[in-house]
Image (cartoon, helix red, strand yellow):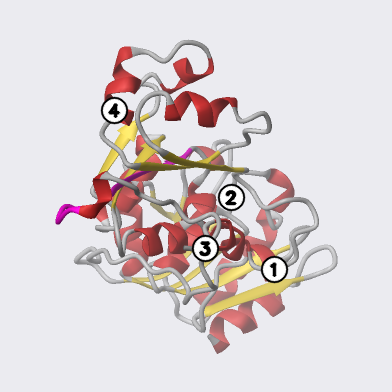
Amino acid sequence: MRAGRPQTPGRGTGPERPRILVVHTGGIGDLLLCGPSIERLARDAAIELLGRPGRLALALDAGLVERVHDMDAAGFDSLFAVPSGPIRALLARFDAAVVWMRDDDGALKQAIQSCGPNDVRTFAGLPPAGWDRHASEYYLQCLGFEASAPFRLSLPPVDTSLDVIIHPGSGGKAKNWPLDRFMALAGELRVRGREVHWCVGPAEEGVTLPADAKVLSEPSLTALARCLTAARDYVGNDSGVTHLAAACGTRTTAVFGPTKPHVWAPRGAHVRAVRGAPWPRVDDVLSALLDG
C-alpha cells in the first residue's frame, strides 16, 4: 500500500466496504480539483464528506459520495479543544479519515483519532507554493495515486437547451477579466446570432448588467450544474464555476490573467484556456470560443 493512502485495518476486512470520511472546507473549484482523488477513494470504500453542505451537496447529487455532513452542525470546531458528543458520534462510524486542512503540529489528527478512526491523514488544502503541475495532481499525490483522467460530474441537464453562458466573476477580483471585455464579447456573440445568458451569484454582487440581459441565478450548485450541462458553450474566469462547467462536459473557455493555466485551468479536450499580459484581448477569447 502506497504511502499516504488511507488504510482500513480491522473493520475493513469483512464484506462491508470500509468507510472513509473526507473533510473538505475549500471552495467549489478546490473541491472539483480534489474530485479525482475522492473518485479514486470511492472505488474501494464508502465515502462521506464533511464541510460546507451547500458545496458538498454537488458531490452527493452526482453520486460521487454516499452522504454529506455540515461541519458546523457536527461540532467540527470542538476538535480544536474538547471533542463534542456529536463529532465523537460521527467520527466513530469511520475506519479512516482524509482531512484537507493544515495540521502542522498533528493536533487535529490526534483529536480525530481519539474519536474512532484508526487511519487519519491530514494535508494542506492547497498545493504548496511553487507547485508547477496541475493542481489535481497534488491531491492525488498526497494519497499515493497516479494522475488520472479529467474529472467529470454526471448530472441530468435542464429541459431547456442553452447556448452561451457567461460567468463574469470569481472568488477573487484579481482573477476577473474586466467586465467591459465580457460585455464586448457578449456583443460580438450576439452579432453572430448566439444567445447569451449571464450567470450571477454572490460573487457578482454589485455587477451591473444590461437591462435586457438574460440572467441565470440558480438556488443551488446542482441546479447551476444542470444548466451548464445543457449549454453549448461557457466562458468565465479562473473560478469555481468555470471548473464546474468543465466538469459537466460543457465546452469551456477559461480566461486567465495572473494565475497559471497549466496549474489551475480545468482539464479536458473541450477546455480552452486563454491567457494574456495582463489580460487576453476580446478577439482572442472570441476566437477560442468559436474554434472550440
Q: Nearer the viewer, residue 177 or 122?
A: 122
> Cα distance, mark 4 to mark 3?
27 Å
Ranked by sequence position, the earlier of labels 1 and 2 is 1
Q: Which residue is mark 1?
A: 133
Q: Nearer the viewer, residue 191 or 201?
A: 201
The span shown in magenta is 14-24
Ranked by sequence position, the earlier of labels 1 and 4 is 4
As drawn, the label of residue 90 is 4
- Residue located 75% across and 72% down the image: 281
Q: Is residue 48 left or right of residue 174?
A: left
Q: Is residue 5 magenta?
A: no
Which one is closest to the eye, mark 4 or mark 2?
4
Q: Is residue 66 left or right of residue 114?
A: left
Ranked by sequence position, the earlier of labels 4 and 3 is 3
Secondary structure of the residue carrying numbered label 4: helix
> Cα distance, mark 1 to mark 3?
21 Å
Labels 1 & 4 near each other (Cβ < 8 A)? no
Q: Label 1 amino acid?
A: Arg
- Residue located 39% across and 22% down the image: 72
> Cα distance, mark 3 to mark 2?
40 Å
Q: Nearer the viewer, residue 190 or 88?
A: 88
Q: Which residue is mark 2?
A: 169
Q: Is residue 141 above or below residue 95?
A: below
Q: Position of residue 257 (x, y in %)?
A: 76, 61
Q: Which residue is mark 3?
A: 2
Q: Label 3 amino acid?
A: Arg
